[in-house]
Amino acid sequence: MKDIDHKLSREIVNTAKTHDVSVIKLERLQNIRSTTRTSRKNNHSLHTWSFYRLATFIEYKAKLAGIKVEYVDPAYTSQICPICGSVHHANDRNYTCRCGFHTHRDLLGAINICNSTEYIGNRYTA
């Protein structure tokens, strides 16, 4: 897993550099293992995923590249419509708002994290 975290973090920072990104935003994931719904299917992968280590690797590689890392509050990132601001639950993996906006809920979360103006500090443990 450590090697995978190094490769993922390098790819994230390299992509940011290629696109002249000055800030990488990450969700502040606290107590992720205790707050995530688990099933037999994903239980093993959840407990072997190193959230904190990956974030740490992204931080130090971004710093070396002159890129800032900010953490945002993950609350409702996959439920808030970026167009009208309404809060709706996704139906399975698809998010559809009454205003007509629709997308995959993971993409919705990424859009909301990117658009977030609420900076909540530096590194937090996962």
Image (cartoon, rainbow, N blue to C red):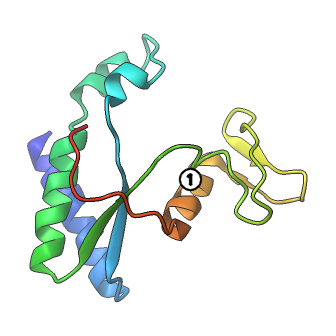
Work out whether residue 64 or residue 119 is closer to the camera in this orientation and state it: 119
Q: Is residue 88 above or below residue 22?
A: above
Query: Would you call the spot at circle 1 few (<14 residues within 10 Å), some (14-19), or many (20 or more)?
Result: many
Q: Looking at the picture, tell me which residue is in the foreground, 10 or 66.
A: 66
* Rendering coords of residue 12 (x, y %): 29, 67
Residue lying at 56% horizontally and 53% vertically, measured from the top left: 109
Quadrant location of the C terminus?
Answer: top left
Which residue position is annotated with label 1?
A: 109
Name the amino acid type tagged 1. Answer: Gly
Residue 19 placement (x, y as % from top left) = 37, 86
Residue furthest to the top in view is 40
Q: Residue at x 50, y 67 (%)?
A: 114
In the depicted structure, whether residue 3 falls above or below residue 18: above
The residue shown at (23%, 58%) is: 122
Is residue 14 toward the left or the right of residue 37 in the image? left
- In which image quadrant can residue 60 be found? bottom left
> In the rendering, at what x and y percent does residue 100 appear?
89, 59
Q: Position of residue 47 (x, y in %)?
A: 26, 23
**What residue is at 72 percent from the left and 37 percent from the top?**
89
Q: Judge left or right: residue 29 versus residue 52.
A: right
